[in-house]
Amino acid sequence: MTEPVRTTNVPVTGPALAGCVIAVTADRRFKELANALERRGASVEHAPALVVVPNLDDESLVEHTRVIIADPPDVVVATTGIGFRGWIEAADAAGLAEDLLDVFAAARLIARGPKARGAIEAAGLTADWVAQSETAAEIEEFLLAEGVDGVRIAVQHHGSGADGLDEAFAAGGAAVNSVVVYSWGASDPEVLAASVARTADGLHDAVVFTSAPGVHAWLDTASAAQLDAIRAHNVSGRLVLATVGPITAAPLSAAGMVPLVPGRWRLGAVVRELVTHYALQPTLETVAGPLAVRARGAVLDGRALSLTPAGASILAELARAEGAVVPRERLQALLPGGSSDGHAVETAMARLRESCGSKDVVRTVVKRGYALALAPPS
């Protein structure tokens, strides 16, 4: 009777993200997110899908501000913290900040979530209502339920500008003034394309997204074949696609992928979800300790191993076999150039055992191949 392979869901030691390679597609707040991931052991790659382009010197923004000061709105909707702060900064550069703040103080201030509320409070003001779901849809439902006929509403939009608020309020009889403080711009296409290709090749453990427009730009960069490969990695559990919330996750779900969505819409919550995910990943119980295989390496007994690309591929193949013998020919095909040297596999195995810190972790099965040495069942 075959003994079951021993696995555990609890890491022995070391940071939960040790050995993980994580691509971050965010432009804004990248350093904050990268530092949080790196403190937990991850290696982080930066490949922004979109970049924020400020319009602080845009004449149309200043002109919109003058119009709003001259004809103050009854309601001001702040959809993003960065946009609301940027609007005040642009007004200050044009000598209009005090007048604009007076307009805000006299209006009813509506915030799309805590970030927008924080920006309002930083300006010395108070938000009158905050959307708990952090969605434009909740703002639309709330104000339309009250009635907006004849109400003057100024809407500060997020980067993509397409949330449907202007049209909904106008249809309800409101006079709407739309303000876009920043927009999304194209990132470095070569950097993004290379990152997407690495994801398709299985070289990333996770990709982190912070906006729906960024997800669309990332997906649009991938070829059909790359999307198929990414989808396969994701659905199989080898690739985590982490998002800040359901709106950001929606384009991934529509593409047939399974995104990781935290309960709270915060960067810190995304990091915690990734930590929890990898902390609970099953590990193989080897004679040298628990083994967890990552996209470009592995963690053995809580220690991230320093492996060559060939060593990482060989160890991953051995791990997939879960203690069964892997033929020498299959492992030889994983070596650079598909080496035909009969001694190349022995050399690679010696290096792998050295990297693992254990000569016993990989067994040599004479005339057959190699196998991971699993710990005997308790």
Image (cartoon, rainbow, N blue to C red):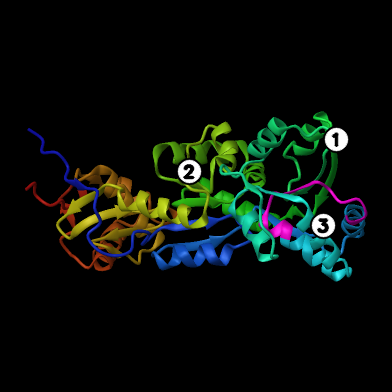
Q: Is residue 73 above or below residue 105?
A: above
Q: Quadrant of the N terminus?
A: top left
On whether residue 329 falls in the magenta region, the answer is no
Task: List x then y, in percent, for residue 60.
Answer: 91, 55
Tell me the kind of residue under disc 3.
Val
Would you say 303 lies left or right of 171 here? left
Task: List x then y, in percent, for residue 295.
Answer: 41, 53
Q: Residues within 10 Å of mark 1 (few under 14, many from 20)?
A: few
Instruction: Work out whether mark 1 precedes mark 2 in sequence or the reverse, and give the earlier one.
Output: 1
Task: List x then y, in percent, for residue 323.
Answer: 19, 46
Numbered circle sitting on residue 15: none
Residue 347 falls in which quadrant of the image?
Answer: bottom left
Residue 225 in sight? no
Residue shown at 82% from the left, 29% from the top: 171
Q: Secondary structure at mark 3?
A: helix
On whether residue 74 falls in the magenta region, the answer is yes
- Marks 1 and 2 close (CB-CB < 8 Å): no
Q: Secondary structure at mark 1?
A: loop
Residue shown at 35% from the left, 64% from the top: 307
Residue 187 falls in which quadrant of the image?
Answer: bottom right
Q: Is residue 348 above or below residue 202?
A: below
Q: Which residue is mark 3?
A: 103
Viewer-proximal residue among 335 and 246? 246
Q: Which residue is mark 1?
A: 150
Q: Which residue is mark 2?
A: 261
Would you say 224 lies left or right of 79 here? left
Viewer-proximal residue among 334 and 119? 119
